[in-house]
Amino acid sequence: MLVVGMGGSLRTPSTSLTALRVAIEGAAAAGADTEVISLSGLDLPFYTAERAAPPAARFLADTVHAADALLWSSPTYHGSVSGAFKNAVDWLALLADRDPPYLSNKPVGMLTTAGGVQGLQAINAMEFIVRALRGWSVPLVMAVAQSSRAFDRDGHLSDDAVADQLRGLGAEVTRAAVQFRAEGTCDYAE
Ligand SMILES: Cc1cc2nc3c(=O)[nH]c(=O)nc-3n(C[C@H](O)[C@H](O)[C@H](O)COP(=O)(O)O)c2cc1C
């Protein structure tokens, strides 16, 4: 069972990357193998179908395809996901010809950090993308509002309640992936 986290912003420290790493801890505690892809480390060019995909894009697509479940994390930028995050998911066009294609049968847990209170707008934007890519969005989401209160200047998460909720999201995504693997269905039970 492999849960792959992808996201974070391109700045350091990145609260959305820290939050992703905490959520991944929850997946690991629930029994999953885990991997985190930091978008700042990938240095992806803008997506185009006009030339061969660079190694970073192929690595992203291959790692996502190998995952049983995903955790997505973007900072909230202007009421949506960041351009860097959207560009990364645009590269998942490379999964069009895989079997199964795109994010079929993969539960996706979504989280964001927001300076204000508009984080759910980024979550909603992610959910549209998940559906477009044939994935299954997990109903439990985490929009960490007023991120400067939950994270210190070094980007460390200092709010234990938020950390617990993030780990809970990682555990929920893992639970959904276990059900998909067993039955090809998911009940998202309480
Ligand atoms: C270009 C830009 C746009 C932003 N737009 C919003 C916004 O619309 N709503 C909001 O609540 N916060 C907004 N913020 C604040 C970020 O969501 C917040 O600082 C977040 O924690 C940054 O994540 P990071 O630490 O991973 O970079 C914006 C920040 C930037 C740099």
Image (spheres, rainbow, N blue to C red):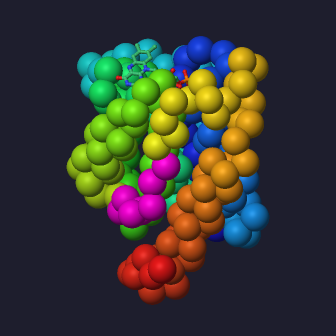
Residue sitting nearer the eye, 153 or 47: 153
**Percent x, y for residue 39?**
55, 27
Judge from the rendering whether residue 99 lies leftward or rightward of residue 71; answer left or right: left
Residue sitting nearer the eye, 182 or 147: 147
- Asked if residue 65 shows in the view, the reply is no
The magenta segment is 136-142
Determine the residue positioned at 37% across, 59% down. 137
Judge from the rendering whether residue 29 lies leftward or rightward of residue 39; answer left or right: right
Residue 42 sits in quarter: top right
Determine the residue positioned at 45% across, 82% down. 189
Residue sitting nearer the eye, 190 or 130: 190
Residue 133 sits inside the magenta stretch: no
Residue sitting nearer the eye, 83 or 164: 164
Residue 140 sits inside the magenta stretch: yes
**Percent x, y for residue 71?**
53, 50
- Asked if residue 84 shows in the view, the reply is yes
Determine the residue positioned at 52% across, 40% down. 144
**Percent x, y for residue 188?**
43, 76
**Percent x, y for residue 87?**
37, 26
